[in-house]
Amino acid sequence: MQHLVSAVEALIFSSDHAISIEDIKSSIELATNSAVSKVEIEEAIQVLFQIYNENEERSMEILFISGGYRFMTKPAFQQYIGAHLKLTSKRKLSQVALETLSIVAYRQPVSKTDLESIRGVSCDYAIQKLLEKELIAISGRSEAAGRPLLYSTSEKFMDYFGLGSLKDLPKIKDFKQTDNMVGEEIIEEIVEN
């Protein structure tokens, strides 16, 4: 059992996205040429939960997000990661890209025309950057005239923000009141529609 626990741990750790039980099972079976059941994998994950999630001395925990398992930093250690990211992150999302991303998240699927009517300015550059960073994806075409592309958030968006589903997005009441009335009005408009 310990070898299986270690194998599952290695797969979750090395995956660049949340890894499903099915993918863990397939990987182990391919590597060992022997069958392993989903129940055995679930038991191994429970052992890892005890090792990481229930031990306060560990800085990491395993979370079920986006249909799979992923190592994440525990909230108590996020200040250190935040400081590190400030030092190393040079390719941050601009305010325009963040606003565009929030509209896509709350109104998806949404067309470029709808994004621009909400923001009041062109969103071409922001959409391009969000597509490059794989935070949004083209999810189809609208039935409206010209059949414009529709944009939705991607799995990488869910992983990046640690969301299990879109229902986990913050509600309008969760936002702090600020002096920026324009931002509040945009958020209220997004949520109300």
Image: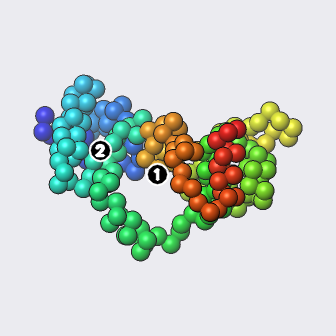
Residue 185 falls left or right of residue 77: right
Identify the residue position indicated by label 2 in the image. Answer: 62
Q: What amino acid is at disc 2? A: Ile
Gap in angstroms between the C-alphas marked 2 and 1: 15 Å
Instruction: Using the rendered image of the protein, determine whether residue 14 is visible from the camera's viewpoint.
Output: no
Q: Is residue 176 above or below residue 171?
A: below
Mark 1 neighbour density, 10 Å: few (under 14) some (14–19) many (20 or more) = few
Residue 160 disc label: 1
What is the total number of numbered labels drawn onto the structure image?
A: 2
x, y percent for residue 76: 29, 57
Tell me the kind of residue under disc 1. Tyr
Q: What residue is at 69 percent from the left and 52 percent from the top?
A: 185
Q: Where does residue 159 sit, x and y in percent of width and height?
A: 45, 47
The quarter of the displayed image where residue 63 is located? top left
What x and y, as percent, mark residue 111?
74, 44
N-terminal-most mark, 2 or 1: 2
Q: Quadrant of the C terminus?
A: top right
Point 32% across, 54% down: residue? 75
Residue at 65% from the left image edge and 53% from the top image edge: 184
Residue 121 at what x, y percent from top left? 78, 59
| Residue placed most toward the observer, 119 or 124 | 119
Quarter of image, res 32: top left
Q: Nearer the viewer, residue 8 or 145?
A: 145
Horizontally, residue 4 falls left or right of residue 162, namely: left
Q: Residues within 10 Å of mark 2 (few under 14, many from 20)?
A: many
| Quarter-of-image position of residue 94 | bottom right
Q: For the residue labelled by badge 2, is the local secondary structure a helix, a strand or a loop?
A: strand
Side (left or right) of 32 relative to 98: left
Q: Quadrant of the N terminus?
A: top left
Relative to 98, is 8 above or below?
Answer: above
